[in-house]
């Protein structure tokens, strides 16, 4: 019994709070990115359609969408590399269409499919970027050493980039974006075509950068699981529109069916135990249904409605298990997967949004909820 | 684009600022030009071109030296003998002359350093990264053009230096001051002519997404211009303005119209300028002398040399047109680049 308890502790500790976080509601600092009805048209094609977006200091914001959903176009407009057809954007309080150089001095950018000069070494490539950013030699070299160390490329810094692997290039790309000591990082598909281990490394690095350097990060991806694991908030893009913004949980609440799922691992030696377990679990308030595994022992799935009751239900399950003498092996809330949310989100017809009115809390997902 | 900060550890006019204080740098084109120049000078194409051009200069030089030695006695009194190094070739192969070799190779030189300037960055994926740095967008194309011009300048000076050095040390021919002036003017005009092809290569590299395409088209145009260009324009000129006039005035007018059409080719303009600058006894309509004998002959016919300033006056229109063509080509490339979307 005691071993099972220790086993489930980390799970409980790591459980996300399902209630909407108050942090996002605060009227605190100015957003590092704010767009207002930002629109980009290529001929008849509307790549980005009336985008309202806010990214706050110190957060990792994920732009999620399929290829061609308008993520890269949005990023290019934020950097002043592409002119919006209408609407406006502010990055670090500056309009990228009018002050692109000031914006680009403050924002590090990792382009989709980043390229380097293959004949030059990693260090030489970074040196070029540093000089383009006006860093003097005595400032540039320590900065280059620092970022190379941060991305773990110090040992390969003097090899030509032509010899780098795909993952190393991607890390060099992040170093390249960091060398100017930016306040904001914009990363376009930072994990594409990198092996799973490399992805974990990069996501860890991003998280570290936010805590160590106090950066804000906006990254785009079409890989849901990765966005989910690293981003504080997520914006879902579909055909040029932002169809949902918020934390994973908020998006789950918005696009989910209003239920939450808890997985309970139970060790039930006798059929009597199975019956007892079923009765106990069904008896808990707010439990909608219980799925038992075939043999009784194993993972039970508890559906909770309303979803925000999940935390309390988890506690009740623990109490019920103790009271009924059930042997727990695991107790884990199932974080709604973004895949699920994303599928629902893009399938749902886009209804006229109610939440476009500008308010301090306009970024809360619930406000954007289609009617 | 006045630079207050020279990124190369140089002069900083602003007071020293703490690191987090953000200086938006100026003169990004200089950083780009410096990097491109370094790349160019170390590139394989630079070394290959240097070898090709060196050979192109040395081979005619040997045959010219032979001729000059043979005629040494006669040549003592010949004015502008130093310039003859550049315009005398083998009597058997009249194209084997320094000036005509340079005329043929010059476009290649320009194209070679520009055909992949922009689309190369694009295909390597470095263009978005470059443009995401705090520079003006035109810094990229300006820097690349400046670097190209610098490389061309280096190559041209090297060739002329080789020929002149050979003349001075091996043949003992010392240039007169006016000859130095003429040579300098010729180098400048050649520089502009190569600059024109450089700008053309840059334009191709902006317009075409693939370096291979722009290289093929660039070299195709070069080939067409150098081999069939005069022929085609000649036909066109005769078709548009045939010499049918009955009076001399009419015929002259029609001939001038024909000449105007053939002058649409930059190569034609350049060869006219070369003929006048490197051969003081020449006038633009005369054919170029092929051997020292012809030079002497010409000089017997026209014993007075054209003064340097008169020669300049004579070719000034051609020079202006060459400069205008270069500027126009670069302007086209510039505008095309500025209007292009960053993403392909």
Image (cartoon, rainbow, N blue to C red):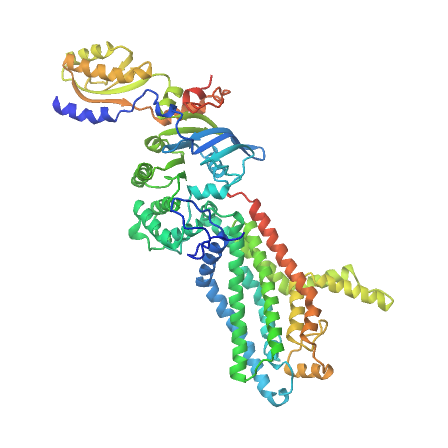
| Picture quadrant where residue A304 is located | top left
Q: Is residue B339 or residue B179 the one in the foreground?
A: B179
Q: Residue furthest bottom?
A: B73
Give the residue drawn at x 26%, y 15%: A312
Which of B162/B64 is in front?
Answer: B162
Q: Vertical placement of A123 versus B342: above or below? A: below
Residue B78, percent from left and from top: 65, 85
Answer yes or no: is residue B56 visible. Answer: no
Quick one: A156 or A162, which is closer to the camera? A156
Total marks shown come to: 0
Would you say A187 lies left or right of B321 here? Answer: left
| Residue visible at 21% across and 10% down in the picture | A279
Q: Reply above or below: B248 against B206.
A: below
Q: Is residue A366 left or right of residue B296?
A: left
Q: Quadrant of the N terminus of chain A?
A: top left
* Location of residue A101 in the rendering, given as x and y in whole percent from the top left corner: 49, 44
> Looking at the image, is A137 positioned above or below residue A73?
below
């Amino acid at each position: 019994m005691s071993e099972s308890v220790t086993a489930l502790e980390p799970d409980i500790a790591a459980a996300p709070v399902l209630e909407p976080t108050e942090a996002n509601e605060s009227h605190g600092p100015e957003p590092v990115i704010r767009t207002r009805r930002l629109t980009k048209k290529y001929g008849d094609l509307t790549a980005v359609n009336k985008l309202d977006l806010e990214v706050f200091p110190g957060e990792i914001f994920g732009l999620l969408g399929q290829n061609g959903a308008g993520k890269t176009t949005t990023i290019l407009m934020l950097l002043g590399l592409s002119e919006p057809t209408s609407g406006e954007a502010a990055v670090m309080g500056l309009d990228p269409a009018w002050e692109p150089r000031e914006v680009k001095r403050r924002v590090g950018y990792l382009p989709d499919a980043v390229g380097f000069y293959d004949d030059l070494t990693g260090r030489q490539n970074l040196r070029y970027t540093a000089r383009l950013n006006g860093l003097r030699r005595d400032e540039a070299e320590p900065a280059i050493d620092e970022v190379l160390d941060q991305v773990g490329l110090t040992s390969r810094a003097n090899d030509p980039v032509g010899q780098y692997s795909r993952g190393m290039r991607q890390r060099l790309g992040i170093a390249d974006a960091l060398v100017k000591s930016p306040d904001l990082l914009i990363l376009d598909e930072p994990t594409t075509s990198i092996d799973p281990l490399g992805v974990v490394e990069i996501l860890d690095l991003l998280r570290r950068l936010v805590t160590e350097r106090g950066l804000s990060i906006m990254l785009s991806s079409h890989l849901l699981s990765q966005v989910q694991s690293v981003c504080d908030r997520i914006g879902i893009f579909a055909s040029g529109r932002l169809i949902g913004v918020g934390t994973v949980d908020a998006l789950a609440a918005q696009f989910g069916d209003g239920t939450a799922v808890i997985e309970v691992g139970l060790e039930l030696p006798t059929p009597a135990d199975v019956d007892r377990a079923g009765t106990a679990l069904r008896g808990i308030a707010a439990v909608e249904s219980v799925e038992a595994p075939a043999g009784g022992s194993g993972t039970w799935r508890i559906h909770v409605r309303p979803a925000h009751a999940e935390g309390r239900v988890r506690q009740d399950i623990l109490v019920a298990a103790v009271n009924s003498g059930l042997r727990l092996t695991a107790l884990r809330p199932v974080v709604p997967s973004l895949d699920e949310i994303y599928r629902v989100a893009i399938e749902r017809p886009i209804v006229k949004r109610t939440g476009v009115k500008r308010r301090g809390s306009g970024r809360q997902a619930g406000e954007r909820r289609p009617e | 684009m006045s630079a207050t900060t020279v990124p190369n550890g140089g002069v900083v006019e602003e007071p020293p600022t703490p690191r987090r204080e953000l200086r938006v740098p100026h003169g990004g084109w200089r950083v780009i030009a410096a990097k491109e120049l370094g790349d160019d000078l170390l590139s394989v194409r630079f070394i290959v071109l240097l070898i090709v051009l060196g050979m192109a200069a040395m081979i005619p030089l040997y045959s010219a030296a032979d001729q000059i030695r043979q005629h040494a006695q006669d040549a003592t009194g010949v004015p502008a003998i130093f310039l003859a190094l550049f315009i005398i070739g083998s009597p058997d192969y009249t194209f084997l002359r320094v000036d005509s070799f340079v005329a043929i190779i010059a476009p290649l030189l320009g194209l070679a350093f520009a055909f992949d300037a922009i689309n190369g960055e694009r295909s390597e994926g470095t263009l978005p990264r470059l443009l995401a740095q705090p520079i003006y967008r035109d810094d990229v194309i300006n820097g690349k053009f400046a670097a190209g011009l610098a490389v061309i300048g280096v190559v041209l000076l090297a060739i002329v230096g080789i020929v002149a050095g050979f003349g001075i040390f091996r043949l003992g021919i010392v240039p007169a001051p006016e000859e130095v002036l003429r040579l300098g003017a010729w180098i400048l005009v050649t520089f502009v002519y190569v600059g024109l092809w450089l700008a053309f290569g840059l334009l191709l590299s902006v317009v075409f997404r693939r370096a291979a395409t722009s290289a093929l088209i660039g070299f195709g145009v070069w080939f067409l211009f150098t081999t069939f260009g005069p022929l085609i324009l000649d036909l066109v000129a005769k078709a548009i303005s045939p010499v049918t006039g009955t009076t001399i005035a009419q015929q002259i007018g029609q001939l001038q119209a024909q000449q105007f059409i053939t002058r649409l080719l930059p190569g034609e303009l350049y060869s006219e300028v070369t003929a006048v600058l490197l051969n003081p006894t020449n006038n633009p309509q005369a054919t170029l002398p092929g051997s020292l004998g012809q030079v002497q002959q010409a000089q017997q016919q026209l014993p007075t040399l054209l003064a340097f300033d008169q020669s300049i006056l004579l070719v000034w229109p051609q020079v202006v047109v060459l400069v205008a063509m270069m500027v126009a080509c670069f302007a086209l490339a510039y505008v095309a680049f500025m209007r292009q979307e960053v993403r392909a």
